[in-house]
Image: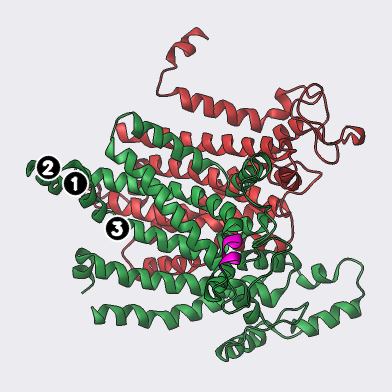
Amino acid sequence: MKKYINKINKNNLPVIVSTLILINFSFGAFLYNFTHDPYTTDIIQRLTPPGEGFIFGTDEVGFDIFSRTIVAGKIDLFISLSGTFAALIIGLPLGLMASDKTKNAERIMKVLDMFQAFPLLVLAIVIVTMWGNNIRNVIFAIILINVPRFTRLIRSEALTVRESRFIEVAIAMGASKTRIISKHLLPNILGTLLAQASITTAHSIVVVAALSFIGIGVVPPEASWGSMIRAGSQYMMTGQWWMSVFPGLAIFFSVLSFNTISQYILRKYEQI
Amino acid sequence: MLKIIFKKLIFIPIASFFVSSLAFIVVNLTPGDPVEVIAGGIATEETKQAIRVELGLDKSVTERYINYLTELLDGNLGSSFYNKIPVLDSINKYLFDTFELIIMSLFIAVVLGFFIGGLGAYFRGKLPDKLTNIILSVIQSVPDFFLGLLLIYFLFYKFELVPAPIGRIGLSDIPPEEISGGLLIDSMLAGNWETFKIGLKHALLPSVTLGIFYSSYFGRTARNVLGKSLNSKQVEFAKSLGLSKFRMFIYALVDARTPILTYVAILFAGLFGACAIIETVFAWNGIGQWAITKILMLDIPAIQGFILFAGLITLFTYTFLDILITYLDPRIRKKTL
């Protein structure tokens, strides 16, 4: 243990804290011994301010805000992470294909450009309402929003790396296309890719929250940060701040964590 | 230059066709049956069939698509499924409200972003640089609707500095006669400064929210571009000539105009959809809020109309931006010729 503590320094401390925050929200249901169940309401204790009994207070129907803020992380982070991961998996071959200097490559980019012309948040809302209000479609919307971004990024990165000498040498030595991509191209764009994935996850958390904030996607009684903020939004005008503020802070810290991790990855890869 | 403009403009009709097709596809090629959702679970088969005929969903997709395109050529976007108001009229009605919000927000975002980013670039590597970097990270991590709620709590509830977030004007205030549809523009045109002032007060919270939120984009860009050009050869030359630090800063600003313009244009186009949630929070009654209500009601013609409209706005803005940048930046101009 001491060995690990000694390794903490000014550079990696933010990342360690960020990781801890994310673990806290992902596995919160196991880490805490909740005094109040996140899915049962206490009608008598409605709108209790934070304090003894309920550390984060209760909402308008008597849900305990603390336990709900913690367990909401599991579903919100799961959607954002899986959506981002799937988008990356789809975007990678597309981006590599688009980095060829062929007519097809140009076509891929043209289609993606068209796609970018749409208001993506509204598109996500349309998909979730019209295709059915469930978690699978929220993930699908996240994928749809992010595939063009990954494709674009991978293409531009691959284009730069492809110009470099060592690729030229590898081609001259008769290396196969698979070998060039897996041994030379991918390791060189991995850093940027991971950093982008981290930022995308952060962005997806906000999209998921925005969806449940307007009442679609993850809906009560299932806990999600967006719907919790929605439940408290009217009460911000009358001073019961705790209903919206705690889930809002949870979003803030998760997003900040992913952004911090992204910056750290970028710096790490730039050093090499 | 004229040749370049012509080249860009000729692309618009083709792109418009694609955008309108995509708008159709998104709404019409859905795996589920929208009628089920509109009619609700307990509707009889007859009701469902009636809705289908009403929406034209009994026809095949190709038939509907051709129908949609011919209507579109006449400038007809169809009318709302529920209240039969033509979609184009609704867009007209709400467009300028959102337009006003976007202009004010972008103004705040640019000024604030430049201030933060400029401060960082001016004191590169020193304490203010680190501080502004932290501030930008924080702004980037707050969802805009949450920021809006925080501002409501502090500025409205706690300090009572702004009126209640219930719309563009108070409940007892009389709106000006509609000319453009935008409250501030209309009251200005009517010379009604009293209403203008009230409208401005109500606009404060939403535009400050969006302004702060998007200032992080400009802040980061300003910091990077200004930092780079302050380290560049021409600024070093200016320094060796004995020009003041402030003068050099102004020179660096000129360098930053293209990326900043690009961001302004991208955000301007994107905000017509992206400000939807903020509009909902503040009951702004703009086009974004209208779109969200319509989407939740599954008002298919309206959704289609809005997506098409937003796509076209983006298309025209980007084309205009392209032309502007080729005009401003001789390097790009040389390349495209």
Q: Give the range drawn in magenta.
A: B193-199
Amino acid type of the residue tagged 1 in the rendering: Met
Secondary structure of residue under mark 3: helix
Q: Residue furthest left?
A: B241
Residue of label 1: B248
Of the chain colours in the picture, the one used for chain B is green
* Disc 3 residue type (three-letter): Arg
Between B214 and B61, the residue placed more toward the observer is B214
Name the residue: 31% across, 72% down: B323
**Three-letter amino acid code at disc 2?**
Lys
Residue B146 at what x, y percent from top left?
A: 62, 45
- In this view, B199 is above or below A1: below
**Mark 2, residue position:** B239
Identify the residue at image location x=38%, y=65%: A105
Provide the letter of the chain coloured red: A
Q: Residue A252, labelled with which disc?
A: none
Query: Looking at the image, which is closer to me, B96 or B320?
Result: B96
In the rendered view, tell whether residue B109 sits above or below residue B48.
above
Q: Is B274 situated left or right of A78 in this image?
A: left
Residue A234, position as x, y percentages in the image: 75, 48
Q: Earlier in the sequence, mark 3 or mark 1?
A: 1
Asked if the residue at tag 2 contacts the one at tag 1, i.e. Cβ–Cβ closer than 8 Å, the answer is yes
